[in-house]
Image (tube, rainbow, N blue to C red):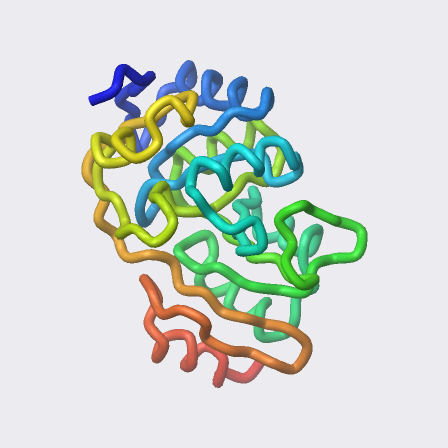
Amino acid sequence: MTDCPVVRIDCENPQGRLIDQAVALLLRGDLVVAPTETRYGLLARADDSKSLEKLYRAKDRDRAAAVAIFVDSIEALDTYGVMTPSARRLAKRFMPGPLTLVLTAADEATLPVESDGRVGLRVSSSPVVKAILEKVRKPLTATSANLTGHGEAETIDQIVEAFASDVALYLDGGRLAGTVSTVVLCQGDRTKLLREGALSADGIASVLKETA
């Protein structure tokens, strides 16, 4: 393994010093790999173009490809996206958790991660991600820690092999093999399942059929 800053973190009760270290690196524009409730995420400041350029280069990802973001609460969804009745219903049932809502971007919250006027939003149930967001007080990228076009990584060793020194800190929470988040588009009167993941299509459909 390349000599990179890899430290073991408790996924349920993350050590404060490690959270502080991750926050300091993110605020200065560096990349951090951290465990989420599904797989490992590659974190960067979603409000900072230079941080995002680092992320896109590291992932070898087309700059036109959208990247979802983590926000710190369900209430914060309104800050970044236009919540439809369907989006509110899904958020109430499944957030925090492995759900990504793709919404029309809010006019007052222009972010460099927006694509075609839309933004993908997640509220994570991971104690590590929640602790980082609470202190960094910025939206963070919610993209998998893997190279574009490659399979999902399960271990830090696999991720270090892919990114090496492009990442400033690797928080090792052990093997993570959870199913990726489910992605649902909620825009105007349109609601569409874009990717079935940890939440089933039937589960999403069932909630959407419920009366308000």
Q: In the rendered view, does 19 fall on the left or right side of 147?
A: right
Q: Is residue 63 above or below residue 51?
A: below
Observer-nearest of 175 and 111: 111
Residue at 36% from the left image edge and 70% from the top image edge: 196
Q: In the rendered view, does 210 fall on the left or right side of 147?
A: right
Observer-nearest of 3 and 190: 3
Residue 207, image x and y in percent?
45, 77
Residue at 68% from the left image edge and 65% from the top image edge: 104
Q: Is residue 207 above or below residue 155?
A: below
Quarter of the view holding residue 183: bottom left
Residue 187, image x and y in percent?
64, 73
Residue at 26% from the left image edge and 22% from the top image edge: 8
Q: In the rendered view, does 150 fall on the left or right side of 187?
A: left
Residue 67, image x and y in percent?
53, 51
Residue at 33% from the left image edge and 26% from the top image edge: 164
Q: Is residue 33 above or below residue 94?
A: above
Name the quarter where the C terminus is drawn.
bottom right
Quarter of the view holding residue 1: top left
**Count of numbered tags:** 0
Observer-nearest of 154 and 173: 154
